[in-house]
Image (spheres, rainbow, N blue to C red):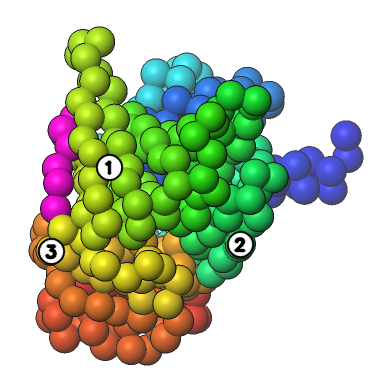
């Protein structure tokens, strides 16, 4: 292999390493991603070194004032990283840090958060949407599936059942009535079962929120530590949220279509970290929270999903945040 080919291969290696770094920071416990990550490490002996170089860079960036609140990602010391030489270099860098100038740190932060490996490549879903995109899908039974931005599903229909798996993101379902073929939506560890109804399901980190807008819906939660299953029957306007292995019932709203279908996001005492997760699904601009002390702050109200200047103003006014835009691609919040 000539020098030009070597250089191109190394650039590709670092680009893939940056993509994996961001993915594993956002989804550190996803078993499917971890499996693919391990396979990627084994594809080429250079991959581990490239990945650890990204980890070292992030650690150095932590010394720069612009991102001094960032923590070192735990996945940089994963047991999957078995190359002792590369790992030793990385661990040595934690005690012998080389300062980087703020401008370089900002540039590399921009590279890390913008070069994002699309989730649909990992999951190979039946249907998916990209950031800022929505989709309306008519299913073979007459039901209609509405996919919100950066969301994905798998469809599994049979003669006796209709099953949909929400892999990530959010979806609204308008279910065609058929008593002989129950309609089920699986999301993380919950199952929503309906015969003829309309409801919205949203994944947010490890939790799932289900809101019923028409009919009746059965929500089942599989327990992690036993074979038991919790179950709640909800009616129009009610909402069920899973958190810490429990179902929580609350009042939603009586509108038929969910807020996101009207380009709105309703915040009901939602932590800032969750707000950022949802905004990153909607806007092509990447939101990054620099001050971890702000992560637990709660937000209430309604913000638009199609007007970035107004969204930034609401964030600033509600939580007294300072926002910095980097080349219209990254919004730093502090």
Q: Which numbered marker is on residue 269?
A: 3
Are the two marked residues, 3 and 1, in contact with CB atoms closer than 8 angstroms?
no
Q: Which numbered marker is on residue 207?
A: 1
Of the numbered discs 2 and 1, the one sitting upstream in the chain is 2
Q: Which numbered marker is on residue 136?
A: 2
Q: CA distance from mark 2 to mark 1?
A: 24 Å
Of the numbered discs 2 and 3, the one sitting upstream in the chain is 2
- Between residue 279 and residue 260, name the one nearer to us: 260
- Between residue 303 and residue 195, name the one nearer to us: 195
On whether residue 292 falls in the magenta region, the answer is no
User: Residue 141's x, y, as percent?
Assistant: 65, 44
The quadrant of the rendering that contains the C terminus is bottom left
Q: CA distance from mark 3 to mark 1?
A: 15 Å
Q: CA distance from mark 2 to mark 3?
A: 29 Å
- At a point 75% along the width and 42% down the height, the residue shown is 9
On whether residue 248 falls in the magenta region, the answer is yes
Of the numbered discs 3 and 1, the one sitting upstream in the chain is 1
- At a point 33% along the width and 32% down the height, the residue shown is 190
What residue range appears in magenta?
245-250
User: Residue 223's x, y, as percent?
Assistant: 23, 20
| Residue 10 lies in quadrant | top right
């Amino acid at each position: 292999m000539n020098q030009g080919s070597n250089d191109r291969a190394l650039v590709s290696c670092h680009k893939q390493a940056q993509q994996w770094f961001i993915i594993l920071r956002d989804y550190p416990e996803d078993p499917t991603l971890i499996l693919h990550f391990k396979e990627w490490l084994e594809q080429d002996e250079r991959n581990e070194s490239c990945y650890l170089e990204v980890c070292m860079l992030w650690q150095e960036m932590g010394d720069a004032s612009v991102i001094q609140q960032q923590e070192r990602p735990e996945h940089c010391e994963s047991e999957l990283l078995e190359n002792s030489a590369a790992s030793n270099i990385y661990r040595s860098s934690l005690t012998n840090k080389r300062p980087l100038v703020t401008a370089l740190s900002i540039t590399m932060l921009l590279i890390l958060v913008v070069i994002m490996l699309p989730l649909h490549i990992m999951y190979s879903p039946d249907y998916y949407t990209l950031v800022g995109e929505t989709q309306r899908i008519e299913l073979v039974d007459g039901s209609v599936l509405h996919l919100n931005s950066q969301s994905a599903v798998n469809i599994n229909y049979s003669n006796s059942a209709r099953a949909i798996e929400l892999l990530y993101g959010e979806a609204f379902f308008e279910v065609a009535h058929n008593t002989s073929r129950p309609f089920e939506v699986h999301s993380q560890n919950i199952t929503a079962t309906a015969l003829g109804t309309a409801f919205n399901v949203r994944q947010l980190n490890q939790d799932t929120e289900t809101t019923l807008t028409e009919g009746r819906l059965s929500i089942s939660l599989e327990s992690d530590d036993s074979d038991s299953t919790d179950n709640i029957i909800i009616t129009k306007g009610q909402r069920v949220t899973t958190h810490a292995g429990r179902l929580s019932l609350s009042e939603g709203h009586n509108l038929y279509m969910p807020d996101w279908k009207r380009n709105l996001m309703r915040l009901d005492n939602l932590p800032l970290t969750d707000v950022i997760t949802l905004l990153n699904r909607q806007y092509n601009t990447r939101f990054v929270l620099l001050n971890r002390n702000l992560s637990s702050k709660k937000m209430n109200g309604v913000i638009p999903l199609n007007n970035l200047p107004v969204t930034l103003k609401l964030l600033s006014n509600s939580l007294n945040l300072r926002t910095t835009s980097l080349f219209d691609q990254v919004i730093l919040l502090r």
